[in-house]
């Protein structure tokens, strides 16, 4: 068979059948079972035999585990020969902790491969071309939007060459992060605070400044409602030149902690990128938040707004250099949810420009094998 080429990224040259779409949607549902906050993307795969019957399914369970295609092919065995594979992300052509999925597909005797999202990484990408060159019929770009939504932060990071940054804030209705005496516990209620722990668990790193770390002595861990630690913890990152005291909670054994001795948001994000971090949750105070906003490296805002008035106190964000309403930083709301007595607003910041440097010059950490 000859590979079917796409006229443009994300546009299928030959319309997939109803059965093809059904199998890809099943693969998307499998992918959603993978972990968030992992350096690898969430991927699902479905394998059918030569007659179109499903004989294997799988999803990627996290860095260091078998890729979705390999799990599905292992379940299918010899029944995969002459069949088709449906994968939410272009099969990788890279050897990391595991071997290339393209090799596993070729050995299995798969005749057709359908994939949703093209792989944006410089090291693992190129799998579709490799399969086509080997005579496999390949069709990509099918349900690509749904696949990208499953890995929005990971995709953003690789397209822009830096981690995606989500700024989380808790504020009163009049824009205060704390009262005049500095107290801020608790502006929001239990439902909103529980949601914050879900948000932390979905990110790979939580970042604060040394001022917040010293003033609050927060743990920055992801916890269950009963206070127990979740199995997967984000990297705790403190940014600034001041040292943490030996007894600081951030230095305990509940989660790893990294101290970045810089005030430059871009340098901090570069250091985290080099460590394989692709999604950062910014939880710092108003000064750090303003620094990231002024640097243009905040990509998403998650605001927990409480129906509380203080009238005075510490602002939610520091000086942004904006002097007129015409220059206001306006966000695009994508979700508004009521959590108990509070409201969570999720909004996008204006899209950052993709990286202009050659992506091949950026090393891919060994744990990021897709």
Image: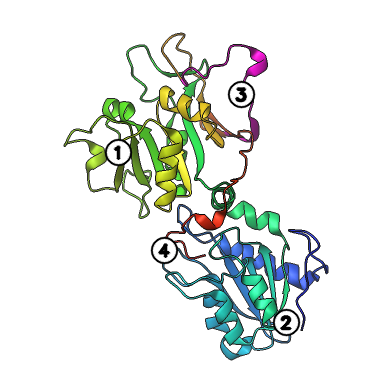
Query: What are the residue bounds of the magenta stretch?
Result: 316-337
Q: Residue at x 43, y 35 (%)?
A: 193
Measure how far apart labels 1 and 2 are at the Cα level. 51 Å
Q: Name the residue under label 4.
A: 366
Rendered image: mark on residue 52:
2
- Image: 247 above or below 91: above
Measure the alpha-carbon separation of dots 3 and 4: 38 Å
The one of 75 and 42 positioned closer to us in this rendering:
42
Along the line of sight, the residue nearer the viewer: 2 or 114: 2
Residue highlighted by disc 3: 329
Q: Where is residue 220 in the image (x, y as percent from the top left)?
A: 34, 39
Disc 2 and disc 4 in contact, CB within 8 angstroms: no
Q: In the rendered image, is residue 223 in sight?
A: no
**Residue with the mark numbered 1:** 219
Q: Does the magenta stretch include residue 332?
A: yes
Answer with mark 1 or mark 2, whichever residue precedes in sequence: 2
- The residue lying toward the viewer, choosing from 23 and 166, is 166
Foreground disc of the pair 2, 3 = 3
Render colour scheme: rainbow
Residue at position x 41%, y 51% in the image: 274
**Label 3 residue SS:** loop
Please identify the residue farthest to the bottom as the structure is shown.
Answer: 78
In the image, which is nearer the foreground, mark 2 or mark 4? 4
Which of the two discs, 4 and 1, labels the residue nearer the N terminus? 1
The residue under the point 56% across, 36% down is: 300
Front label number (4 vs 1): 4
Tell whether 202 sits left or right of 186.
Answer: right
């Amino acid at each position: 068979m000859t590979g079917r080429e796409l006229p443009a990224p994300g546009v299928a040259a030959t319309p997939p059948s109803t059965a093809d779409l059904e199998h890809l949607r099943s693969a998307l549902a499998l992918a959603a079972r993978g972990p968030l906050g992992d350096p690898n993307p969430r991927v699902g795969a479905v394998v059918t035999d030569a007659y179109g019957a499903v004989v294997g399914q799988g999803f990627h369970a996290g860095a260091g585990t078998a890729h979705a295609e390999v799990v599905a092919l292992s379940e299918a065995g010899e029944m995969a020969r002459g069949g088709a594979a449906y994968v939410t992300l272009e099969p990788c052509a890279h050897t990391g902790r595991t071997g290339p999925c393209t090799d596993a597909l070729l050995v299995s005797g798969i005749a057709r491969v359908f994939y949703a999202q093209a792989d944006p990484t410089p090291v693992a990408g190129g799998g579709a071309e490799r399969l086509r060159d080997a005579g496999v019929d390949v069709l990509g770009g099918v349900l690509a939007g749904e696949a990208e939504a499953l890995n929005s932060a990971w995709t953003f990071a690789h397209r822009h060459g830096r981690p995606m940054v989500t700024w989380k804030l808790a504020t009163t209705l009049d824009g205060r992060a704390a009262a005049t005496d500095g107290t801020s516990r608790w502006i929001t209620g239990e439902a909103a605070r529980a949601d914050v722990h879900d948000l932390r668990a979905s990110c790979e790193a939580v970042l604060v400044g040394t001022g917040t770390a010293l003033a609050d002595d927060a743990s920055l861990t992801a916890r269950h409602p009963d206070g127990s630690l979740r199995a997967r913890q984000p990297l705790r990152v403190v940014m600034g030149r001041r040292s943490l005291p030996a007894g600081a909670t951030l230095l305990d054994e509940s989660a790893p902690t990294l101290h970045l001795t810089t005030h430059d948001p871009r340098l901090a994000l570069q250091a985290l990128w080099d460590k394989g971090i692709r999604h950062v949750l910014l939880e710092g105070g108003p000064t750090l938040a303003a620094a990231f906003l002024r640097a243009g490296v905040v990509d998403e805002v998650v605001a927990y707004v409480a129906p509380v008035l203080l009238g005075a106190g510490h602002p939610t964000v520091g000086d942004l250099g904006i002097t007129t309403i015409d220059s206001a930083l306006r966000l695009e709301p994508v979700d508004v949810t009521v959590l108990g007595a509070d409201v969570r607003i999720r909004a996008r910041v204006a899209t950052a420009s993709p990286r202009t440097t050659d992506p091949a010059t950026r090393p891919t950490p060994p744990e990021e094998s897709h």
